[in-house]
Image (cartoon, grey):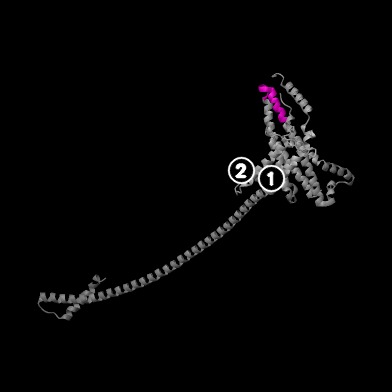
Amino acid sequence: MKQYPGLIIALLAIQNDLNAAEAGMPQLDPKYWASQAFWLILVFTILYISIAKFYLPKIKNNLDNRENKIKNDLEDAGKFKELSDSKLKEYKNILEEAKKEVTKIHLETKNQLDKDIKSKKEGIEKEIEKELLKAQKEISELKKGSISNIQKVSESIASNIIEAISGDKLNESSIKAVVDDVSKKNIGKYLK
Amino acid sequence: MASNPMQQFSVHKIGPEIKISGIDLSFTNASLFMIISASAILFFLFLGSKEKRIIPNKVQLIAELFYTFVAKMISDTAGSKAKPYFPFIFSLFMFVLFCNMVGMIPYSFTVTSHIIVTLIMALFIFIAVTIIGFAKHGLKYLSIFVPSGVPVVLLPLITIIEIISYLSRPVSLSVRLFANMMAGHTMLKVFGGFVISLGLLGGWLPLGFSVALTGLEILVAFLQAYVFAILTCIYLNDALNLHH
C-alpha cells in the first residue's frame, strides 16, 4: 500500500466512478421531484411570509430607530456646540470689556492721583516758601533788634566800667559815640 | 471501503407516503432539511430582532448586517425601484445560504445540490422577472433583446443571441448553484473516502485536502448564495430599468 499510493488513488477513483455510474445521480431520478418541488414551495412560501411580515419590519424598525437616535444625538451635539461657542464668545466679550474698564479705571485713578499729588505738592511748596520768608524776616528783625540791644548793653557796660575805674560819671552821649564807633568796626564779625 | 460519493444526494422517504391525485408528495429527507434551514433562519431572525437595543447584541448585529448587506446589494444593482422585492430577495438569499451551510454539516443533506430545487427557484425568478418586465413596460420590454448602438447588419444575429441568453438564464442560474454544491460535496466525500482507504500511512494527504476543501466549500456556500441573489437582482434590474 505504501509503495503505490498513486496507483491506489487511481484505482479508487475508478471504483468510485463505477459506483457513481451504477447508482447514477440521484438528482436526475424524477421519483421525488414533485415532492421536492411541493415542499420547497411550501417551505419557502412560509419562510417568505414570516420574513416579510414579521422579521424584516422589526429589523428595519430597529435600524431606523438607531439612525434617528444617532441623527438626533448629532443634532443635539451640534446645538450644544453652538451654544457653548456663543457662550464662549459672550464670555470673551465680557472679559474684554472688563479689561477695558480696568485699564480705564486704572488710568483715571492714576490721573486723579497725579493731580492730587501735584496740587498737594504745590500747596506744600507754597507754604514752605511762606514759612521760609517769614523765618527770614524774623531772623532779619532779630538781627536788627540784637544790634541795638548789644549797643545798649555795651554802652551800659562801658559806662559802668568807666565809673568803676575812674569814679566819675561820663556823659552818656560821648560813651554812645565811642561804642557806636567800635561796634560799627566790629559788629560785622558777629552778625554774619 | 468508501461508500458511493453520490449516496449523500439520494432522497428517501421519511414517514408515510403522501399521494395526492397520483403524485407522490411524500415527506423526504430533502423536505426535512428545507424545514431545518427555514427554521434556522426564522430562529436566527427571531433572536436578531427580539431585543430592540440601540447598541445591538451579537445576534442582532449579525441579523442587521445581513439586512444591510442584502439591502445594499439590491440598491447597488437594481436601484430604488427594486425596494418592494427586497423581502423576496432577502428570503431567497437567506434560504440558499442556510441550505448551503446546513449542507456543510457532516451527515446532513444539501437541499441546493438538487437540480430540481434550484431549477424551480430559478424558473420562478425567471417567470416573475419576465412578468414584471412586461407589466412595467408593456411590449417595450421586448427592446431588451435589441441592444442600442449595434450596426443594423449585426442586429438579427445579436437579437437571436440576446434571446438565447435571456432564455438560458434559468438554466444557468439553477445549474450554477446545483453543480457547485454537488461538485463540492462529491469532492469532500471522495477525499474523505481516500482518507479511510489509504489508512494511517497515506491518509494524511487527502485529510489535509479535505480540511482545505471544507474551508473552500464554506466559501463557495456563501459565494453561491450571494451570486444567486445578485443575479436575481440583475435580472430584476433589467426588468425594472430598461436601459439597453
Query: Where are the magenta residues, as a range?
Result: B187-203
Chain bearing tag 1 is B
Q: Which residue is mark 1?
A: B69
Q: Earlier in the sequence, mark 2 or mark 1?
A: 2
Residue B195 magenta: yes
Q: Nearer the viewer, mark 2 or mark 1?
A: 2
**Residue at figure coordinates x 75%, y 48% from the top left:** B78
Q: Position of residue B76 (x, y in %)?
A: 73, 47
Q: Position of residue B83 (x, y in %)?
A: 73, 50
Seen in the image, is B127 located left or right of residue B69? right
Q: Amino acid at mark 2?
A: Lys
Q: Classify B226 as above or below A140.
A: above
Chain bearing tag 2 is B
Q: CA distance from mark 2 to mark 1?
A: 16 Å
Query: A112 or A157, which lies in front?
Result: A112
Q: Classify B203 as above or below A160.
A: above
Q: Main secondary structure of the magenta part?
A: helix
Query: A43 or A27, which lies in front?
Result: A43
**Residue at figure coordinates x 75%, y 42% from the top left:** A41
Other residues around mark 1 within 10 Å, as few (<14) / some (14–19) / many (≥20): few
Q: Residue B58 has which mark?
A: 2
Q: Position of residue A7 (x, y in %)?
A: 74, 21
Residue B117 seen in this snapshot:
no
Q: Secondary structure at mark 2?
A: helix
Disc 2 and disc 1 in contact, CB within 8 angstroms: no
Q: Secondary structure at mark 1?
A: helix
**Which quadrant holds residue A77?**
bottom right
Q: Amino acid at mark 1?
A: Phe
